[in-house]
Image: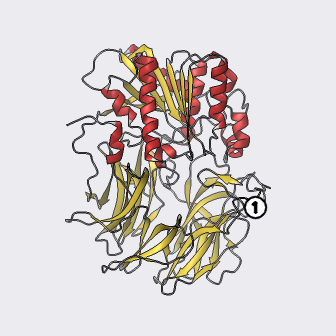
Amino acid sequence: MSRLSLTDLYRIAVPGDPQLRPDGAAVAYTVTTADKDSDENRSEIWLAAPGAEPRRLTSGPHDLAPRWSPDGRTLAFLRPVDGRPQLHLLPMDGGEPRALTGAAAGPAVWSPDGSRLAFTAPHGEPDPNAPVVADTLEYKADGPGLLRGLRTHVFVVEVATGQRAQLTDGDFHAGPPSWSPDGQQLAFVTSMEEDRDLTPAGAVYVVGLEGAEPKRLTEPDVICAGVWWLGERLVVAGFKGDPTGHTRLFTLEAGGLSEVETGLDRNVMLGHSGYPGAPPVLLGDELLFCARDGGLTHLYGAPGRTKVGGEHSVSGVSVAGARLAYVAATPSSPGDIYLDGERLTDHTLPDLELFPLERRLFTAPDGTPVEGFLLRDPERTGAGPLLLDVHGGPHNAWSPVFDGVHLYHQVLAARGWSVLTLNPRGSDGYGEAFYTAAVGSWGLSDADDLLAPIDALVAEGVADPDRLAVTGYSYGGYMACWLSATDGRFKAAVPGGCVSDLTSVSGTSDAGYFMKMFECCGDLAAQSPLTHVAAVSAPTLLLHGERDDRCPVGQAEQWFSALRERGVPARLVRYPGASHLFIIEGRPSHRLDYNERIVAWLEQWVIGSES
């Protein structure tokens, strides 16, 4: 047995998007790996069934979104053609895949009779050299970049002929569609309000196959974020009032939206944008949904019955009849396919011995409990160097499962470090009051939740107060800047994808106005690390994607410039073409470099040796 190394990045295979065949006997799913030679992430579609070895269905290298036809004889999936994802059909009788669409498409949704596929796709062919004209704030998005007026709309394609019809049109973005039980309508969520860039809104609409004007079904008292026709009822995910609290579930009835009694004070996790969870599904008459409890995302049946719990963190769910398939990560696996609780795959790295995470409960100065996880070689004794790693969001949470992104955690533990990950107020999984406790007070109400546990570990003789460092990504990058500016204990800092000035980010981020109005509402200067930069002494490594539109690279440039002007050792590393989620989805070489640089910087400035 050996310890994990950073190059094990190329050995990790992550399953996702499980799709249970309609007969309930097999599961199609994606497997994503990092390919060193091509420096790209590969994805293939596989099939797993009880009592059989998993087998590959497609060769990739970028096949995604498998979807079964109602009779289980055909698998629709996405494969890029000339750089654009297009729908393909794979007959399960041994034939070759065939392209169905000649233009870009999103994941397929089969009609109940199997004759059509619905999907959303960008509409239009903007000129990449034309001037970019913006009349509203929604002119760019992290990942796609400048939208150039492009809008996403609902399409339907005939399986037999490939004839494609556009059902919606106009100045709005249509969300993923869901078929009515009779196959005559499609429900989707969008906002058609003229000031939707200033006032968050979302409503459920339905459109018929004839492509008439969509009909609105919901009122503005709920901001809708997703809709699914489950059986005979429409299930909606959304927010009551401002979008600052938990995502909730509703059913659409004659009198409007009625909230589903989940029995939990927890945020419903829909599984998008790099977060775990999955859309709600119907198992028999039971509505299933994902929610995070502590650091783990579990599957529940309303109201509050645990379906998949324990040390599993769920990131994909599918049902067929009375059978349930899902993907779940565990402390030893980045994810495996399960069918009715039986594990069908094994994505552990059997020759590796991982250091275990110790679940800890700390107490903030005001008495608030703060959960965290301590990674340390159990054979080590005495006080050693400690790295505090702050998660993003801020409404994300650390989880005690195998982490294939932050590989430097295990590498540092092998070098004698302790790595502390904490879920301070603002984190998901601890109730809505905790979830919203840092709104309007970033850095002011949450910092003590991160510092008090360090004090406790110093008092226990675990952490050496002269060898402390801080890192984090996104909101965690913000906190790495904030803590290094407001608390002098850290000997090194590594902000990734950071925010250093809330005033300027509110006008440059694709989500800047939302952050200003609903997250950092209040005195932006008081909550900005840049206001306090004169106090920074910790050598700082800044890691940032060049095409990050969520936390634009100018945020790192401002911090780097301010530190250089003051003579603080600093280094800025920019990753070409990388968006905000590059540490999860970006080039393997960039992800490896990110991990390597963190280890080297900490060893240089905290331990005093180059690695």
Mark yes or no: residue 366 visible: no
Task: Estimate how packed mark 1 is, as few (under 14), some (14 to 19) or many (20 or more) residues with alpha carbons within 10 Å.
Answer: some
The residue positioned 56% from the left and 52% from the top of the image is 247
Image location (x, y in percent) of residue 13: 34, 52
Quarter holding the N terminus is top left
376 vs 549: above or below: above
Residue furthest bottom in the image: 161
Image location (x, y in percent) of residue 82: 53, 67
The residue positioned 31% from the left and 58% from the top of the image is 337
Relative depth, front residue between 430 and 566: 566
The residue positioned 59% from the left and 62% from the top of the image is 258
Image location (x, y in percent) of residue 154: 61, 72
Quarter holding the C terminus is top left
Mark yes or no: residue 525 visible: yes
Q: Amino acid at mark 1?
A: Glu
Total numbered badges shown on the rendered structure? 1
Relative depth, front residue between 316 and 385: 385
Image location (x, y in percent) of residue 158: 52, 83
**78 left or right, relative to 213:** left
**506 left or right, relative to 22:** right
Relative depth, front residue between 187 and 593: 593
Q: Dot 1 corresponds to which residue?
A: 193
Q: How is the image coloured?
A: secondary structure
**104 left or right, relative to 361:** right
Mark 1 lies on a secondary structure that is: loop
